[in-house]
Amino acid sequence: MTRPLSHPSWKTNKLVSRFFQYLILSIIVVLMFVPVVMLVFGALKTRGELITHPYTPPIPPRWENITGILETPIFWELLRNSLFVMFVVTLAVVVICSLAAFVFARMEFRTKGLAFNLFTLGLMFPINIAILPVYFVLRQLDLIDNLWGVIVVQTAFQLSGNIMILRGFFTAIPAELQDAAYIDGCTTFDFFWRILLPLARPALSAVAALTMIVSWNDFLIPLVVLNSEAFWTLPLGTMQFQGQYGSDLALVSAFITLSAIPTIIFYIFAERQIVAGLTAGAVKG
Amino acid sequence: MQQPPFVQNIFKSNRGSGTPRRFQDNLTIFLFLLPAILLFFTFVVYPILQSIYYSLFDWKGFGPAVDFVGLENYKNILSDMVFLKALKNGLLIILFSLVFQLPLSLLLAVLVGRDLPGRVFFRTVFFMPYVLSEVITALMWLFIYNPDPERGFINAVVVFFDGNAQTWLASTDLVMPAIFVALTWKYFGFHMLLYLTGLQNIPQEVEEAGRIDGANAFQNFFYITLPLLASTIRTSVYLSVLGSIQQFILVWIMTKGGPVNASETLATYMYRFGFVRFQLGYGSAVAIYMFILCLTFSILYQRLTRQPDYLSGL
């Protein structure tokens, strides 16, 4: 048991295992990119090229499909609606969830356990199951065919998970800090606003990033709530576009590619926050 | 910069203003929880209750529900072959996920490991499909599953290797595996991420110690790493099962539950009755069934998979 840690056989072992690690991982990466590459290839070909050479790289790339879509107002309207919904939902979720999570993490009251369990119940009732019941309520509230209908429902169904994530982060902030703040004369709100929230900024940005992704990608709620084309969001518009121009695969591919670009850019910049939020949420859940 | 009067004011407002801390706290609790509770009750709790009510009626959605049928809807659902098919498909997705998707994610997480150069690159790439919308995912896969080898890449590969082109999404036998591949493509990165985080929480010394004691890589993995990952696996399985039960958008866009209901899931079944056929009472009953299913599973799962005591220290 006195084998030195840098035994030569270990080194070759390590090299061999590294080689296989990279080999398998690279194969998976290539396989994973197949659908994406096919889509992008299609987007950069003309309709004729896509029919005659469906799988070759687009050389030279044809930008006509992309520029054509960018010149029509449809794409920009969809983008604007999606952005509007996303920003309002994210703002609402961050504000509402941090208020509620603060109470659950930092304050005591008699029915706290019950109230918190009620919110966890929300996780058992995800929107894919709830959509029909929620539709009835929206109809009663006259929120059908209205972007605010989408906004309130998306916000409501983001509450449970995000309250749980934030509660976890808030609980981790030491209690001594709260005592010190109270001794120094802070009110509860002062403590929340001036001390806790600034400290929890990473958690808040994680929740915001997650909410943005969920709201941006949501298809079901807009599908059920929105009828008028003027209100459609990007995923809804993408489906509609595919239905309308289905025979021109190159054009549809271009549209789908364009609609994926904002997500990918956002992902590259906010990966850390998204990962932090998801893993925190999963551990708490 | 000292402000003695300011400090005095604070004492005054807390002691002399006649509003005891207790009352202030209760007010804060009330006001802080109010928006969350309002939204939650209006759009989560109230809809559940209302659905329970509507599920007792034969209701087409126009005017008040008057045609009371009791538990008729619930009985009819259970005797509908299509519902049973949807239930079976849900179980199939769960089974596939547990047998293929999660082990694959775990394998990749172990391969990416803690210190592989390029680790961040692989994590970023594998996780990317998770952030792409389900609409984009579904359409991409719809394209490459095209039955015509001149248009669908997968069939082009099959033909290239002298196979017969398949009608993937239009075949009652192949449609579920085909959908499952797309589902795996989209979701394995999420589970891999969970495992990666779990792996990072395992102290490296423990594995080192195993190696020094003469355990080979497999023994190390099965007797040390895997047991220490138990709580991560537990979470990942839980989320995977809940996700499988409610699978909707991908299936709806790719097949609409077809051909001949071969890829029907519970959520597409509910959507069809609620929003296509407008049998809202019946659809509500389906929603309640799904809710009960998720709830029962969650409670049982949490009960049955309590972390064993000897792991609680880690």
Image: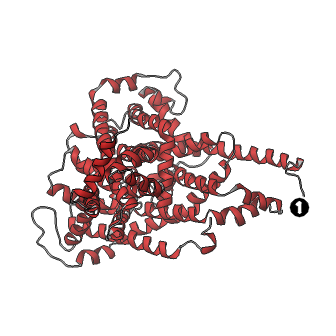
Instruction: Please identify the residue farthest to the top as the structure is shown.
Output: A60
> Dot 1: few (<14), some (14–19), or many (≥20) neighbours within 10 Å?
few
Q: Is residue A73 left or right of residue B306?
A: left
Residue A67 visible in the shown view: yes
Element type at marker 1? loop
Q: Chain of mark 1?
A: A
Q: Is residue B73 left or right of residue B87?
A: left
Residue at 67% across, 50% down: B111
Count up the numbered dots. 1
Q: How is the image coloured?
A: secondary structure
Tell me the quarter of the picture where residue A117 sits: bottom left
The amino acid pointed to by label 1 is Met
Residue at 55% across, 40% down: A33
Residue A232 placement (x, y as % from top left): 26, 40
Q: Is residue A60 above or below residue A201?
A: above
Tell me the quarter of the picture where residue A86 sits: top left
Nearer-the-camera pick, B199 or A19: B199
Residue B43 placement (x, y as % from top left): 25, 59
Residue B105 placement (x, y as % from top left): 59, 54
Q: Is residue B52 above or below residue A74?
A: below
Residue at 77% across, 58% down: B217
Residue B142 placement (x, y as % from top left): 44, 45
Tell me the quadrant of the picture where the N terminus of chain A can be found: bottom right
Q: Is residue A274 left or right of residue B119?
A: left
Residue that mark 1 sits on: A1
Nearer-the-camera pick, A257 or B125: B125
Q: Is residue B181 left or right of residue A238?
A: right
Residue A154 visible in the shown view: no
Nearer-the-camera pick, B71 or A56: B71
